[in-house]
Image (cartoon, rainbow, N blue to C red):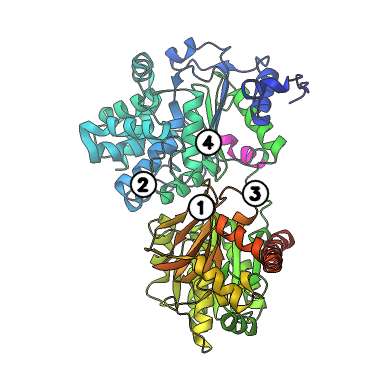
């Protein structure tokens, strides 16, 4: 772009209706800058194409979360023409198998115009992006689907676009009437036995395929589907396999822009495909899909304005696919052991002593972003740089994607840890997820992998194993009395006896909600047996409490419950009504003062743990 567009002054009160995302503003500026460019000419070798309005100019950009930016004539329909080629190639790879397709269609750039009547040394098309390769693809589908061939193709194109697509019958008839060059290519392919069906039947499929109507918005979504490993980001449908996508993007990179392909990948660096109808689509893997429509073409048959949009987007945001700035060192958001950051379970003195003696027995690595080859390699080296733990927990709840190379390296890392008798614990991933299936498919039957969805549950479990290994015991059925309650430390036996007389013993079943956030705080609870956990309303676990701990104690400071308390196992608790407790404090002011000091100490300990957690995240 050559001009700067001033940002309009916005009224803060109109945020929801007037705020414009920066990318929308950039695309609008591109449209304003490039619309006055009247270079190039509308294609007329197919007479019906020559009727296109040269003033039309539309841009669409689809993100991988399904948002679509649109500017200008983004909903104006035009025929897809050669932009259909990569999608039909991907369809053929999946529907017919790569062996059958790759046996007759090459993948080398030709260096020739898109309609060149020339084959490679094996008398096969150079690649599926030139007309010869595209006709061969249509021929393979015609051979497999016969009368249903075109509808198979149209259905696939519609799934890429996320909607049913129509055909411009006038353009189809015009192409069929004037397509002698394509007939010559088809007969050459028939002579070489690349296509085996009657030439006119194959060309009817190919011409109709090129006459399918799309918009710039459709092209953006179709390109984004390729960028999203075959998943349409708007509909969520897996349209083609990742294998077909990677091979399709490869030939788009080398040959999608025909005899302009080398300069295109050098200057723009985004796999792309153009069509003589005026469309260009560009697919940046794991990032976005771009579609544009402007029927004025340059000497290579590419849209003049469309090329400028792609060049501007790539240059302005540094989107060349080889200009990657991903840093593996950002893949670990936190790295600690249980000495620095234990679980939220309130443990007894014996358990605390064992865990304090073995602080590095459990290592926790919280990961973020994509588990790529380089990221997993970095994680494995960071793990190896420290002392060998007995348990290592990988928290994956911030992981957004896993690449095939990264997954293979993960599996090899797990096998390596198994050889050293290190147990792997995964958190933040569900067994029903595709990622879990991919991990287990590669790790096989190794027995050193455990999983817990919540990180704190995973840490608790690993801590329990350390306690067991070093002679400790965790008896969830053990019963405790008020004398063991930290909140009541320092009270005399008589004072505790009087307090016990005020208490009612409550029984709770596993999974029962004991307290609910928002309820009035009218009682204190002292856990007598079992286990309960404390969670915020959004599901975040604050603490796990075992016998000998109190809960609901914030009633001494707050009139309303701020968290839920749920029984993990069958549990019993002493419940003391708050008004009875206040009368006890009035009768025993020194005991009441002692209880409040104990509460302050408990809160200080919780704050210390929370600060340690924040410091770990900030440090990494």
Q: Is residue 329 above or below residue 482?
A: above
Between marks 3 and 1 in the image, the one whose residue lies nearer the viewer: 1
Disc 4 from disc 3: Cα separation: 25 Å
Asked if the magenta segment contains residue 260, the reply would be yes
Most prominent secondary structure in the magenta stretch?
helix
Asked if the magenta segment contains residue 311, the reply would be no
Of 138 and 592, the residue lying toward us? 592
Q: Residue 266 location in percent, x, y?
A: 66, 42
Q: Residue 12 location in percent, x, y?
A: 72, 23
Say left or right for 96 vs 570.
Answer: left
The quadrant holding residue 371 is bottom right
Residue picked out by circle 2: 93
Residue picked out by circle 4: 112
In the picture, the quarter occupied by the N terminus is top right
Between marks 1 and 4 in the image, the one whose residue lies nearer the viewer: 1
Q: Which residues are magenta?
A: 258-266
Residue picked out by circle 1: 539
Q: Secondary structure at mark 2?
A: helix
Tell whether label 1 touches label 3 (CB within 8 Å): no
Disc 2 from disc 3: Cα separation: 26 Å
Disc 4 from disc 2: Cα separation: 24 Å
Disc 2 packing (10 Å; few <14; some 14–19; many ≥20) = many
Identify the residue shown where x is 38% and y is 16%.
171
Tell whether label 3 touches label 4 (CB within 8 Å): no
Q: Secondary structure at mark 1?
A: loop
In primary-sequence order, the first of circles 1 and 2 is 2
In primary-sequence order, the first of circles 3 and 1 is 3
In primary-sequence order, the first of circles 4 and 2 is 2
Q: Which mark is residue 322?
A: 3
Q: Residue 65 location in percent, x, y?
A: 52, 39
Between marks 4 and 3 in the image, the one whose residue lies nearer the viewer: 3
In primary-sequence order, the first of circles 2 and 3 is 2
């Amino acid at each position: 772009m050559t001009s700067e567009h001033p940002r309009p002054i916005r009224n803060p009160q109109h945020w929801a209706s007037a705020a414009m995302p920066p990318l929308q503003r950039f695309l609008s500026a591109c449209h304003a800058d490039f619309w006055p460019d009247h270079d190039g000419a509308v294609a007329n070798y197919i007479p019906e194409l020559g009727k296109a309005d040269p003033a039309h100019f539309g841009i669409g950009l689809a993100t991988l979360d399904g948002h679509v930016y649109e500017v200008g004539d983004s909903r104006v329909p035009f025929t897809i023409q050669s932009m259909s080629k990569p999608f039909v190639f991907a369809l053929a790879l999946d529907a017919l198998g790569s062996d059958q397709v790759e046996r007759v269609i090459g993948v080398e750039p030709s260096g020739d115009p898109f309609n060149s009547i020339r084959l490679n040394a094996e008398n096969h098309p150079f690649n599926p992006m030139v007309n010869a390769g595209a006709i061969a693809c249509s021929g393979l589908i015609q051979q497999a689907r016969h009368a249903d061939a075109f509808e198979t193709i149209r259905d696939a194109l519609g799934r890429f676009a996320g909607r049913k697509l129509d055909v411009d019958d006038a353009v189809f008839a015009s192409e069929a009437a004037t397509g002698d060059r394509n007939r010559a290519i088809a007969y050459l392919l028939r002579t070489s036995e690349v296509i085996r069906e009657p030439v006119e039947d194959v060309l009817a499929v190919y011409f109709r395929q090129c006459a399918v109507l799309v918009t710039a918005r459709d092209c953006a979504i179709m390109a984004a589907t390729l960028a999203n490993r075959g998943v349409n980001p708007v509909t969520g449908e897996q349209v083609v396999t990742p294998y077909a996508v990677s091979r399709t993007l490869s030939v788009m990179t080398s040959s999608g822009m025909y005899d302009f392909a080398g300069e295109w990948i050098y200057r723009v660096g985004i796999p792309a495909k153009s069509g003589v109808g005026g469309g260009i689509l560009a697919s940046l893997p794991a990032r976005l899909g771009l579609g544009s429509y402007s029927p004025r073409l340059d000497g290579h048959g590419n849209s003049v304005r469309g090329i400028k949009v792609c060049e501007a987007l790539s240059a302005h945001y540094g989107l060349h696919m080889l200009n990657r700035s991903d840093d593996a060192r950002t893949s670990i958001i936190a790295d600690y052991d249980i000495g620095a950051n234990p679980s939220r379970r309130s443990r007894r003195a014996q358990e605390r002593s064992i865990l304090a003696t073995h602080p590095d027995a459990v290592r926790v690595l919280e990961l973020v972003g994509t588990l790529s080859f380089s990221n997993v390699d970095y994680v494995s080296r960071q793990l190896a740089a420290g002392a060998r733990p007995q348990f290592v927990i990988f928290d994956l709840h911030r992981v957004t994607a896993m690449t095939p190379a990264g997954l293979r390296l993960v599996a090899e890392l797990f096998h390596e840890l198994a050889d050293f008798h290190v147990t792997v614990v995964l958190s933040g991933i569900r067994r029903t997820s595709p990622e879990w299936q991919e991990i287990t498919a590669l790790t096989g039957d190794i027995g050193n992998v455990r999983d817990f969805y919540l990180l704190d549950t995973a840490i608790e479990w690993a801590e329990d194993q350390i306690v067991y290994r070093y002679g400790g015991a965790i008896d969830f059925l053990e019963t405790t009395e008020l004398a063991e309650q930290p909140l009541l430390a320092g009270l005399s036996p008589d004072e505790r006896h009087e307090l016990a007389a005020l208490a009612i013993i409550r029984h709770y079943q596993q999974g029962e909600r004991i307290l609910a956030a928002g309820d009035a705080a009218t009682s204190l609870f002292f856990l007598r047996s079992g286990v309960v956990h404390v969670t915020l309303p959004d599901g975040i676990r604050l603490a796990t409490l075992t016998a000998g701990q109190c809960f609901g104690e914030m009633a001494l400071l707050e009139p309303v419950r701020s968290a839920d308390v749920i029984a993990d196992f069958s549990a019993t608790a002493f419940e003391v009504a708050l008004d009875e407790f206040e009368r006890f404090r009035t009768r025993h002011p020194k005991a009441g003062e002692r209880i409040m000091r104990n509460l302050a100490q408990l809160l200080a300990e919780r704050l210390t743990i929370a600060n340690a957690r924040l410091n770990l995240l900030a440090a990494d």
